[in-house]
């Protein structure tokens, strides 16, 4: 449906890795994973298939000369931007490491369905459901680095900055991509990751070091982190005051900042996939939620009249997805619409329709997936 937005990025484009047309849909500096590729893969998304969301372009950074600068009024000292506490790449490698299996998902994932299912016009990237990936991230707990940098009890916000080029739109320079994280979350389960699925982070995924904020919208997980501000007063940036905020008739005039992600499901099938008629066909897919584990996924193959529980293929990691399968006796030749509806540990279930917001974030509705049997 949105194929006219798709371009093939050249070797000098904003994304470094190859983006084969049968594995990605590309929208300018962003590329989503085609879900049909996941049928042949395991629990995590291979690094080569991981979606990329770049405000500008992937910078190529030398880890040997790179260092992380930590400063702000929330540190003992306090360290200033000009006189920060510094950590080299080797300093981080030498600290105790943790591995966390977590999804990274854009808050705008599924945005195109506001348009195709709810008639709401959206101008930002028309993601289908491929702006999510799951990986095993290895790195240093952010709490350890902040403690070593001298964080005080007065600290309220922690803001990592990316080293990619400043974000400039219509002549307005919003500066480096950055967004504050409340200190309670920053000291809880956030890590500074240097490995993705057992290898150093690939350039497009944040080499040499990126932030991983489990359960939260992808914008919190700053790539190519160069500095971290620790503040005793609340911090603001374009990315928490304007972008990644819910505006619209259902929200207060100042909007609501996005924190955690919502409940979603996807089939490991292309849109309009052709399946054999009158056969036993094993439908597979995955469901996930920013509230924690999925407890149930239901499938409908008859336009949403009857629902049947899918069979979980694994328990799934709490901050990632659950894989499921559903044996379908396909009907005769024709067009059909598949639906998957997940419920998470808090009882949040995917609705038939989603309350609109201006920028089309957090579409958690049941997605209608057309297939053809022949
Ligand atoms: N420095 C920097 N960090 C960033 C971004 C960016 O453009 N620059 N994009 C953010 C957004 S909006 C998302 S959804 C995730 C995407 O992570 P990925 O590109 O590894 O999939 O990175 C986040 N971190
Ligand atoms: Mo995003």
Image: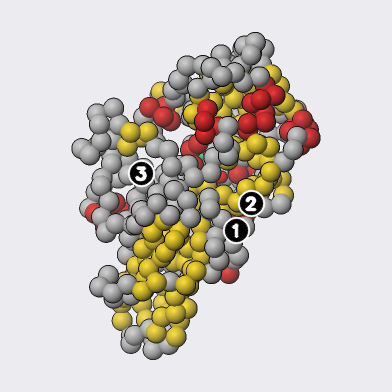
Name the residue located 42 percent from the left edge and 27 percent from the top edge. 238
| 2 or 1: tag closer to the N-terminus | 1
Residue identified by numbered label 1: 44
Element assignment for label 2:
strand
Q: CA distance from mark 1 to mark 3?
A: 24 Å
Instruction: Please report the residue visible at 68 percent of the width from the left and 41 percent of the height from the top.
Output: 139
Q: Are marks 2 and 1 in contact (CB under 8 Å)?
A: yes
Question: Horizontal placement of 43 versus 197: left or right?
Answer: left
- Give x and y (percent) for residue 211: 59, 37
Image position of 332 with respect to 23: above or below: below
> Please, what secondary structure does the residue beneath circle 1 have?
loop
Q: Which residue is mark 2?
A: 136
Query: Closest to the observer: 254 or 172?
Result: 254
Cβ of mark 1 under 8 Å from ligand 1: the answer is no
Q: CA distance from mark 2 to mark 1?
A: 7 Å
The 10 Å Cα crowd at callout 3, few under 14, some 14 to 19, many 20 or more, is many
Q: Residue at x 72, y 41 (%)?
A: 97
Residue pointed to by mark 3: 361
Q: Nearer the viewer, residue 33 or 221?
A: 221
Q: Position of residue 217 (x, y in %)?
A: 46, 42
Furthest toward the left, the residue is 249
Mark 2 vs mark 3: give the one in front: 2
Q: How far, Cα to Cα, is label 2 from label 3?
A: 26 Å
| 10 Å crowding of disc 1: few (<14), some (14-19), many (20+) | some
For marks 1 and 3, the one nearer the N-term is 1
Q: Is mark 3 within 8 Å of ligand 2?
A: no
Q: Quadrant of residue 41?
A: bottom right
The mark that comes first in sequence, 2 or 3, is 2
- Residue 65 visible here: yes
| Displayed quadrant of residue 328 | bottom left
């Amino acid at each position: 449906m949105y194929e006219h937005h798709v371009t093939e990025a050249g070797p000098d484009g904003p994304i470094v890795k190859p983006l084969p047309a049968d594995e990605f849909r590309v929208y300018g500096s962003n590329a989503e994973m085609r879900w049909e590729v996941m049928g042949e893969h395991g629990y995590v998304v291979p690094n080569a298939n991981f979606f990329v969301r770049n405000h500008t372009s992937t910078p190529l950074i030398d880890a040997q000369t790179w260092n992380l600068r930590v400063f702000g009024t929330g540190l003992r000292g306090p360290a200033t931007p000009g006189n920060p506490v510094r950590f080299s790449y080797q300093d981080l490698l030498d600290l105790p490491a943790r591995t966390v299996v977590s999804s990274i998902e854009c808050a705008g994932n599924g945005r195109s369905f506001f348009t195709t299912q709810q008639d709401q016009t959206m101008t930002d990237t028309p993601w289908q459901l491929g702006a999510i990936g799951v990986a095993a991230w290895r790195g240093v707990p952010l709490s350890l680095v902040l403690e070593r940098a001298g964080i005080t009890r007065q600290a309220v916000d922690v803001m990592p900055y990316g080293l990619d080029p400043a974000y400039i739109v219509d002549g307005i320079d919003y500066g480096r991509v950055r967004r504050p994280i409340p200190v309670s979350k920053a000291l809880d389960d956030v890590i500074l990751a240097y490995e993705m699925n057992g290898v150093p982070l690939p350039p497009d995924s944040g080499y040499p070091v990126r932030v991983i904020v489990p359960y939260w919208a992808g914008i919190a997980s700053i790539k190519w982190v160069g500095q971290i501000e620790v503040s005793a007063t609340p911090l603001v940036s374009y990315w928490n005051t304007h972008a990644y905020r819910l505006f619209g008739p259902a929200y207060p005039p100042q909007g609501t900042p996005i924190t955690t992600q919502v409940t979603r499901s996807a089939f490991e099938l292309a849109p309009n996939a052709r399946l054999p008629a009158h056969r036993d066909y094993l439908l597979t897919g995955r469901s996930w939620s920013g509230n924690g584990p999925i407890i149930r996924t239901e499938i409908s193959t008859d336009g949403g009249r009857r629902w049947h529980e899918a069979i979980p293929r694994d328990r799934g990691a709490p901050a990632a997805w659950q894989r499921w399968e559903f044996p379908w006796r396909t009907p005769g030749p024709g067009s059909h619409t598949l639906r998957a509806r997940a419920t998470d540990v808090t009882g949040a279930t995917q609705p038939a329709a989603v309350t609109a917001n201006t920028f089309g974030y957090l579409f958690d509705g049941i997605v209608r997936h057309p297939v053809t049997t022949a």
